[in-house]
Image (spheres, helix red, strand yellow):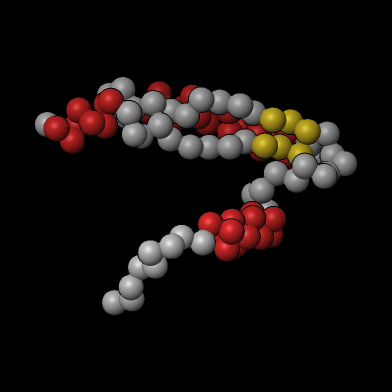
Amino acid sequence: MSEVSKEYNFKQAEEKWVASWDDSVYYFDWESKKPQYIIDTPPPYPTGNFHIGNALNWCYIDFVARYKRMRGYNVMFPQGWDCHGLPTEVKVEE
């Protein structure tokens, strides 16, 4: 097993990930001449058990993002999950 460095080289990590994002087809191109379409949504928040409604609401937004991309827009549709809040803490304590 390799040792973990005591010093974190954040510059090296940043360069690695910026290069990865720049090469990715999923990264938003701020220099693009295409019209921009940016979708800003709050992350889904786990307040209970997930159900079909959670997926359906996200699908509507995904449909719009895909449609706009097909129509030639440069679309930014960041996705994430708010999974570090109180509901998670409560579940862990159960």
Which residue ends up furthest to the front in the rendered image?
7
Q: Quadrant of residue 23?
A: bottom right
Quadrant of the image containing the N terminus: bottom left
User: How far across and down, in percent of the image, does residue 90 sit?
Assistant: 20, 28
Is residue 12 rendered to the left or right of residue 36? left
Q: If the image is split into quadrants, where does the C terminus sit?
A: top left
| Residue 39 in the image: above or below residue 23 | above
In percent of width and height, residue 70 lies at 75, 40
Residue 37 x/y as whole percent: 74, 31
Q: Residue at x 81, y 39 (%)?
A: 72
Q: Is residue 27 visible?
A: yes
Q: Which quadrant would residue 16 be assigned to in this image?
A: bottom right
Name the residue at the right extreme.
33
Residue 47, percent from left and from top: 31, 22
Q: Nearer the viewer, residue 64 or 4?
A: 4
Please, which residue is most extreme toward the bottom here? 1
Q: Is residue 30 left or right of residue 52?
A: right
Q: Residue furthest left?
A: 94
Residue at (58%, 37%) from the top-left corner?
78
Q: Is residue 20 at all visible to an observer of this figure?
A: no
Of residues 10 and 32, which is closer to you in this image? 10
Q: Residue visible at 53% across and 57% down?
A: 10
Is 57 situated left or right of 77 in this image? left
Q: How many marks?
A: 0
